[in-house]
Image (tube, rainbow, N blue to C red):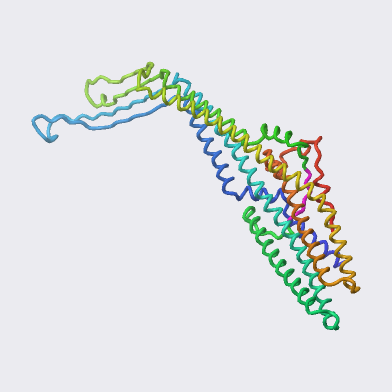
């Protein structure tokens, strides 16, 4: 009963400390400085939106003056003359009526900037998601390679012990002994290298999540998200849904709004102005009459000529629009190229893994048979070492390809712009429900 409880406690503790792909990505989002800067940028643009809205409202200023005045005659110093005390209060109101659509376009610019910043944040999240997934999978891959190196070392150790016994019994050669010893030393070196590689991969993952983890804490999750069936379908989806596309398109709109905003120079500016001037010093003087002023009216300002600067600036803004359009075309090319590389990796590694799946079984069968015959004395040590090295090399290739294929799937999601949403489970995993991916079957299949 105590043993069962201990096992249950160990399993429960391991589950509590487990780190899923989603949980680790959430931690990465919380700790990545680029993401935090982009989120803060959204807050800053919100204030710019408030400032732009304020352009629709009037400006009201209060000016107050309280002063003493003495006028001296025939003297350089204020020694004679009457002393006057004055209090003046002025309230000014200015309400924009027409500014060449500057206010409307400024509001459009700020709202478009906010929308662009949202997609820019999603673009940064997508890039972080790929880096994080690479580091997460590298830990799993390094762990599997370390297990393989441990297996290889134990096998080399067993070969060395059997060879040593043969030499001690007098029917083993010194060459066999030295080769078995060299094979053991090589396995020891590879084991040390894989241990260091695992620690490096864990450190890279730590850089993302800022939390100490062990390779045993990571969960080998199934890839349960369907992919587009063809590269063309994936590209069509990316050109409509990729955040980089939204950023580029919105930036063109912003450039157009800015160009329209600058057209204010070709339009008059009309404001409603009101002023109330209260001179409160009259109450200090006998028989003085109040001197208060009330003004209200319209103010029109229209620039007739400024040396052609407005026309030049307008042409410059149109060139900016062309520039943003060029950048949109470049974004399309970048997405297409990135998707092509991801798709090629996806297809090639899928085919490679299918072949390696059978090849590693063959290598293992050859090793087992050679090792048995070596025990019977019908095979020499060289054949065993060669079979051992061939098996380990093929198995390492298989493990690497398995994770390369899994990463290729995530790279496809990154290339079409939805990797971060997939990790956060913000996307329906049946989006490409009619498509087919056998990654789950390949990845979870148990290969000895």
Note whether 435 is above or below 23 in the view shown. Answer: above
Quadrant of the drawing holding the N terminus: bottom right
Residue 359 falls in which quadrant of the image? bottom right
Q: Is residue 417 above or below residue 165?
A: above
**Which residue, as the protein is rendered here, is positioned at the far right?**
376
Residue that extends furthest to the left in the rendered view of this protein: 74
Q: How many marks?
A: 0
Q: Is residue 269 above or below residue 178?
A: above
Q: Confirm whether residue 105 shows in the render.
A: yes
Could you say where residue 33 lies in the image, as x and y percent from the top left?
57, 48
Is 410 situated left or right of 7 in this image? Answer: left
Front residue (pair 126, 169) = 169
Identify the residue shown where x is 80% and y is 60%: 11
Please tell me which residue is depicted at 60% across the width and 37% down the height of the picture.
Answer: 118
**Residue 309 magenta:** no
Residue 387 picture quarter: bottom right
Drawn side of residue 316 relative to residue 390, left or right = left
Which residues make up the magenta segment?
A: 218-224
Say which quadrant the C terminus sits in. Answer: bottom right
User: Does residue 56 appear in the picture of this structure?
Assistant: no
Near-viewer residue (96 or 182): 182
Query: Image quarter for residue 327?
Result: top right
Nearest the eye: 53 or 25: 25
- Is 54 positioned to the left or the right of 124 in the image? left
Q: Which SS type dominates the magenta stretch? A: loop
């Amino acid at each position: 009963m105590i043993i069962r409880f201990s096992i249950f406690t160990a399993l429960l503790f391991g589950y509590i400390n487990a780190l899923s792909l989603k949980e680790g990505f959430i931690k990465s989002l919380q700790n990545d400085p680029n993401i935090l800067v982009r989120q803060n940028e959204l807050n800053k643009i919100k204030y710019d939106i408030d400032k732009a809205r304020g352009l629709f409202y009037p400006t009201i200023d209060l000016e107050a003056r309280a002063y003493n005045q003495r006028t001296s005659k025939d003297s350089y110093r204020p020694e004679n003359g009457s002393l006057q005390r004055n209090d003046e209060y002025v309230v000014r109101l200015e309400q924009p009526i027409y500014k060449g659509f500057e206010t409307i376009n400024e509001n459009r610019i700020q709202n478009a900037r906010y929308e662009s910043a949202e997609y820019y944040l999603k673009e940064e999240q997508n890039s972080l998601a790929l880096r994080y997934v690479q580091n997460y999978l590298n830990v799993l891959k390094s762990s599997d390679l370390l297990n393989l190196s441990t297996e290889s070392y134990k096998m080399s150790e067993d070969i060395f012990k059997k060879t040593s016994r043969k030499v001690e019994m007098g029917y083993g050669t010194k060459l066999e002994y030295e080769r078995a010893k060299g094979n053991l030393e090589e396995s020891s070196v590879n084991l040390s290298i894989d241990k260091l590689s695992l620690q490096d991969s864990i450190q890279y993952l730590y850089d993302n999540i800022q939390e100490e983890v062990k390779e045993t804490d990571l969960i080998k999750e199934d890839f349960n998200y369907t992919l587009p069936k063809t590269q063309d379908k994936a590209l069509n989806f990316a050109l409509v849904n990729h955040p980089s596309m939204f950023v580029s398109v919105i930036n063109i709109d912003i450039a157009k709004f800015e160009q329209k905003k600058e057209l204010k120079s070709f339009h008059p500016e009309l404001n409603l102005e009101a002023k109330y001037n209260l001179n409160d010093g009259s109450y200090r003087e006998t028989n003085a009459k109040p001197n208060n002023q009330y003004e209200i009216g319209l103010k029109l300002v229209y620039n007739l000529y400024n040396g052609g600067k407005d026309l030049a600036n307008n042409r410059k803004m149109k060139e900016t629009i062309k520039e943003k359009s060029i950048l949109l075309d470049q974004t399309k090319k970048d997405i297409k190229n990135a998707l092509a590389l991801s798709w090629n990796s996806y297809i090639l590694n899928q085919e490679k893994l299918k072949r390696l799946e059978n090849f590693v079984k063959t290598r293992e069968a050859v090793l087992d048979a050679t090792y048995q015959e070596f025990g019977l004395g019908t095979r020499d040590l060289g054949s065993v070492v060669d079979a051992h090295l061939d098996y380990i090399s093929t198995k390492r290739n298989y493990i690497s390809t398995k994770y390369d294929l899994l990463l290729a799937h995530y790279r496809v999601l990154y290339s079409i712009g939805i990797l971060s949403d997939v990790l956060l489970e913000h996307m329906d995993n049946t989006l490409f429900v009619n498509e087919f991916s056998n990654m789950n079957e390949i990845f979870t299949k148990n290969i000895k």
